[in-house]
Image (tube, rainbow, N blue to C red):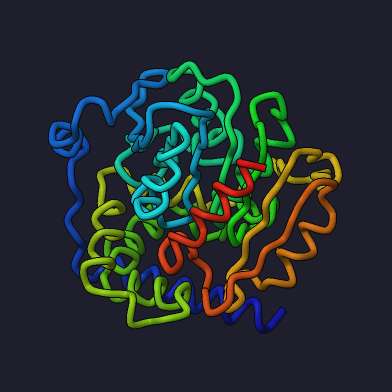
Amino acid sequence: MRGWASATDAWLLVALASLTAGCVSLTPYEELAARLPAERLLEVDGQRVHVERWGTAGETVLLLHGFGGSSYSWRLVGPALGERHLVVALDLNGFGYTERPRDLDAYAVGGQLALILGVLDELGIERAHVAGHSYGGALALHLAWRHPERVASLILVDSAGPEYPSRRRHLLAGIGPLATGFVRSLGLRPVRIRKGLEASFHDDSAVTPELVEAYLERLRVEGIARAYRGLTAPRRDRPEQGFDYAAVDLPALVVWGAEDRLVTPEEGRHAAERMPRARFVLLDDVGHIPPEERPAELARLILDFLGD
């Protein structure tokens, strides 16, 4: 209990301090939307959703990014997959160039799944091969579990567990002024983004200033404080309760970076062992984000898997 109290007090001090620090500027969403090509914005239930697409033929591959990422995280993988498939990468609620909803429920698992299904419906896609990285992997698992008729196969890349969207929540994130102050003053600083990426990469030298800015630019969007609350404040619903890996009876490829310090390869292997039709592949000298560190090899593994 003492350790928990100390951690909570430290978080509170950081949040309080952030209220008095200089706030970063955010891009108004209307200004952002006006700069984007019209074909990259879908309207789903009145919300503008940003998607990237590659390829024009073949079965659909849907790409779901990790926490803090966006469709940008798949930019080195999508074109290779698009040589044989129709590839769609979307920005989830709270990330990238997708409009930030006002309803906090949109940021919970159910809200994210509704967004994903809405995009598939808007594009006229009945079933897709679904690839999810990290947080996107947790959502892919829930999608395959709850809506197996929409998922042709599953590709998990250094995936978070199905409980992650609820486990990562913090009590004080539910206090609006504290959450807003933290995000606007400390959470969106280049140094924090750099540290997060360096923790995720095996080769820190690949974390360039340009990469940091690209990730940061897609977070500094109007509505980010509200999104942070929706993604981080405690919720009463626990959608992952009762999750059964054995019930995900789909062809599955589970790919992991051998040097992942955020979600260990042992966790990935254990998850694969509980899924009836999963195959586990380990990538040497790769951290938590294979789409960034080893995109060509990851694309080849996915194409071989889909070919099989």
Using the image, determine if residue 270 lies above or below residue 11: above
Please tell me in which quadrant of the rendered image residue 250 appears. top right
The answer to whether residue 23 is left or right of residue 194 is: left
Can I make out residue 132 in this image? yes
Query: How many numbered tags mark residues here?
Result: 0
Classify the position of the C terminus by image quarter.
Answer: top right
The residue under the point 35% across, 21% down is: 43
Instruction: Give the residue displayed 47% in from the left and 79% down from the top.
Output: 202
Q: Position of residue 116 (x, y in %)?
A: 51, 31
Horizontal side of residue 132 vs 81, given as left or right = right
Image x and y of residue 2, in percent: 68, 83
- Evaluate whether residue 261 shows in this view: no
**Is the residue 236 above or below the residue 209 in the image?**
above
Q: Residue at x 57, y 55 (%)?
A: 301
Between 233 and 29, the one lying in front of the other is 29
Q: Is residue 306 left or right of residue 295?
A: right
In-front residue for pair 134/104: 134
Which residue is at a point 38% across and 82% down the rendered structure image? 204
Q: Position of residue 101 (x, y in %)?
A: 39, 33
* Quadrant holding the N terminus: bottom right
Residue 267 vertical placement versus 277 (above, below): below
